[in-house]
Image (cartoon, grey):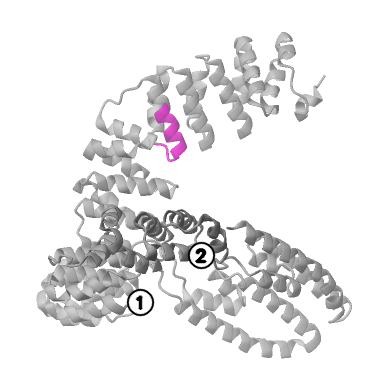
């Protein structure tokens, strides 16, 4: 019989009863359905005590799609600490979802098996800061010692121990350069700043790249950092000129305003552009119905031309986006 | 001309142009689609010596920003004092901060002592790049500050906040002047230091900054005002005088009354336009089925209700954003 209350999570699952009945699927359901960490960990422990059959069921459940339930299962596997789960967790380090990858790095650290070291080192180069952090944390936990300064730098970058990277010197450049494309602009700022603190000419190619970053604070910090690495100041304005420009094309807004009156303004980011567009459609339909087709065309064409011209000049008059 | 058209597809031979000293062609390449070519053209022009000064000074007046930047860069390596006057004009009055910055750096490269006053006034430019460039250029021409006030401007330009703190009250004036800075992070930093330095002027300013449009800057001002001795009971009143930065409540209400949904759009709700589409569709349908005016007579009582709703949500969002 299906336990409906457990399905809807209205009643706390009775872990003891489920354990006594060796109800593996019931326990896995309890993992998903309950919101409180205590019941979840009880269910995980119970599953751990049920031996290989339970492990197989959990690993099978891990291959399902739902992200939230997979996170719970990885947590349960962490709690059970069965060496059998290690290959599966290592596979999970390549998952699409950064949350799953992060959770898996932590799980491997908790289980503490040296098999996980190599895959975790790869995760230090993940593009997500959480995954890097989890990997670094777990590597330290397993007792990994970086074999060289370059690896040490990746570890510190993962930990976001910026000041520690400054002391490493040139060997920190690959690790810091690696995160210059991080999605979080704060990470990029810290990376740029740290490259500056290395005070090395080797860091200049990376810093020149960052002068064209899309974020204005990253660019500004790249300017300050470049001065510590000996980039000639006079080259900087040109370096910054490569940044993505937000300047709009006047021809596009003019054309849009002629064909779809108002949408030229939408293209420029004006909230009222769509409103003009709608009013135009409304007006056209209305005029077609009550004033006749021919008259409508004659009256509207000059208006569209005016809007097109205005869209064009309005765009050319917009200020050059500043640095 | 055909050359620049070809240049879109292939890399032009800058070495050859440099050898034949074809200055106009090199200047045209400053606007080339490829960054590397632009850069090398500027470098080649910089090696042309004083012959290139006059054409480059003309190129500075080109409307294209890449050509202007490249020309300034080339003038900086030629170091012909004849360019100083034009560069000073750009530094003092060009609208584009990038060009003012480049001009400051170029003046430093040319290295003539007479430009010190122009660079000093650029230390109070409202753009951080220009200020930074001016400070670095002053270093380059061997300038050293005579008064504490100049020193304060110089350190602010370099963002050397520790050094500014050491200057104490003589930094107050320059700090207050540079509150015009558009980057909230820098305004916040300035207010923090004003709180640290203290004094009557700083106190007055901190009170004013309580009305800053940026939330973080206002919060810094709260902390600094307290340090400067503004009674804490006065702070809420000071904060309440801040300008309205969000959308206008009245505007949103009126828009939703006449153009149902656009008011929501104006408040930043994505579904505003959906409502507006549906509303327009119903009005048009109504007009086609009945007559042109009837739909509006029915619509306005309904939009009035929506307008009231808009008024309340706009007001709530405004009060939430202290």
The residue to which callout 1 is attached is: B95
* Percent x, y of residue B208: 47, 66
Which residue is located at x 27 percent, y 25 percent? A147
The quarter of the picture where residue B145 lies is bottom left
Instruction: For label 1, count other residues whose C-alpha is less than 10 Å away and answer few (under 14), some (14-19) or many (20+).
Output: few
| Residues indicated by labels 2 and 1 sit on the same polypeptide chain | yes
> Picture quarter containing residue B297?
bottom right
The image's mark for residue A150 is none
Image vertical order of residue B261 relative to residue A196, above or below: below
Q: Earlier in the sequence, mark 2 or mark 1?
A: 1
* Residue ID at (49%, 59%): B218
Vertically, is A88 above or below A203? above
Q: Nearer the viewer, residue A142 or B277?
A: A142
> Is any atom of residue B6 visible in this view?
no
How far from the left and from the top, in percent, is residue B168? 29, 58
Give me the chain letter of mark 1.
Answer: B
What segment is highlighted magenta in the picture? A125-137
Q: Is residue B310 visible?
A: yes
The N terminus of chain B - image quarter: bottom left
Q: Which residue is mark 2?
A: B211
Q: Position of residue B111 (x, y in %)?
A: 13, 70
Q: Quadrant of the C terminus of chain B?
A: bottom right
Q: Residues within 10 Å of mark 2 (few under 14, many from 20)?
A: some
**Residue A78 shown left or right of residue A6 in the figure:** left
Q: Who is closer to the viewer here, A42 or B195? A: B195
């Amino acid at each position: 019989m299906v336990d409906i209350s457990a399905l809807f999570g209205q009643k706390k699952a009775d872990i003891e009863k489920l354990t006594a009945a060796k109800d593996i699927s019931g326990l896995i359901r309890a993992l998903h359905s309950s919101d409180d960490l205590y019941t979840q960990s009880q269910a995980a422990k119970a599953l751990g005590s049920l031996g290989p059959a339970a492990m197989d069921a959990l690993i099978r459940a891990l291959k399902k799609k739902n992200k939230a339930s997979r996170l719970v299962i990885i947590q349960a596997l962490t709690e059970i600490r069965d060496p059998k789960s290690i290959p599966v967790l290592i596979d999970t380090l390549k998952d699409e979802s950064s949350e799953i990858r992060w959770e898996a790095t932590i799980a491997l650290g908790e289980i503490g098996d040296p098999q996980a070291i190599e895959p975790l080192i790869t995760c230090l180069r993940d593009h997500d800061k959480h995954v890097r952090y989890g990997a670094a944390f777990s590597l330290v936990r397993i007792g990994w010692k970086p074999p060289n300064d370059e690896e040490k730098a990746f570890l510190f970058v993962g930990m976001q121990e910026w000041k520690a990277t400054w002391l490493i010197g040139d060997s920190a450049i690959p690790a810091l350069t690696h995160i210059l494309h991080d999605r979080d602009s704060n990470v990029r700022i810290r990376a740029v700043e740290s490259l500056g603190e290395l005070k090395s000419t080797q860091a200049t190619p990376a810093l020149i790249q960052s002068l064209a970053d899309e974020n204005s604070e990253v660019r500004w910090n790249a300017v300050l950092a470049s001065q510590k690495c000996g980039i000639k100041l006079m080259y900087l304005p040109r370096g910054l000129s490569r940044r993505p420009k937000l300047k709009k094309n006047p021809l596009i807004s003019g054309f849009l305003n002629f064909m779809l009156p108002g949408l030229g303004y939408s293209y420029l980011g004006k909230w009222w552009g769509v409103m003009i567009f709608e009013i135009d459609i409304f007006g056209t339909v209305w005029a077609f119905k009550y004033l006749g087709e021919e008259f409508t065309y004659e009256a509207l064409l000059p208006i569209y031309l005016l809007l097109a011209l205005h869209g064009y000049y309005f765009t050319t008059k917009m200020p050059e986006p500043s640095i | 001309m055909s050359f620049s058209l070809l240049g879109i597809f292939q890399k032009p031979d800058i070495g050859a142009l440099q050898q034949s000293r074809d200055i106009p062609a090199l200047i045209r390449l400053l606007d080339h689609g490829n960054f590397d070519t632009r850069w090398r053209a500027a470098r080649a022009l910089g090696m042309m010596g004083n012959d290139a000064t006059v054409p480059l000074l003309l190129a500075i007046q080109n409307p294209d920003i890449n050509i202007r930047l490249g020309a300034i860069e080339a003038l900086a390596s030629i170091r012909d004092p004849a360019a100083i006057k034009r560069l000073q004009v750009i530094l003092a009055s060009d609208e584009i901060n990038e060009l003012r910055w480049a001009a400051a750096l170029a003046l430093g490269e040319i290295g003539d002592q007479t430009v010190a006053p122009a660079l000093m006034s650029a230390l109070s430019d409202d753009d951080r790049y220009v200020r930074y460039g001016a400070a670095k250029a002053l270093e380059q021409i061997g300038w050293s500050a005579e008064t504490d006030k100049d020193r304060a401007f110089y350190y602010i330009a370099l963002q050397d906040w520790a050094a500014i703190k050491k200057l104490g009250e003589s930094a107050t004036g320059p700090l207050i002047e540079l509150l015009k800075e558009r980057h909230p992070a820098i305004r916040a930093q300035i207010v923090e230091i004003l709180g640290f330095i203290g004094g009557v002027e700083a106190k007055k300013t901190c009170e004013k900054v309580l009305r800053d449009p940026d939330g973080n800057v206002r919060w810094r001002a709260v902390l600094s005002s307290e340090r400067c001795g503004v009674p804490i009971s006065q702070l809420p009143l000071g904060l309440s005088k801040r300008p309205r930065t969000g959308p206008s409540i009245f505007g949103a209400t009126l828009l939703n009354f006449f153009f149902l949904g656009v008011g929501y759009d104006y408040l930043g709700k994505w579904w505003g336009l959906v409502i507006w589409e549906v509303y327009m569709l119903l009005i048009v349908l109504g007009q086609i089925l009945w007559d042109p005016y009837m739909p509006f007579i029915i619509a306005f009582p309904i939009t009035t209700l929506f307008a009231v709703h808009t008024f309340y949500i706009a007001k709530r969002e405004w009060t939430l954003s202290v």
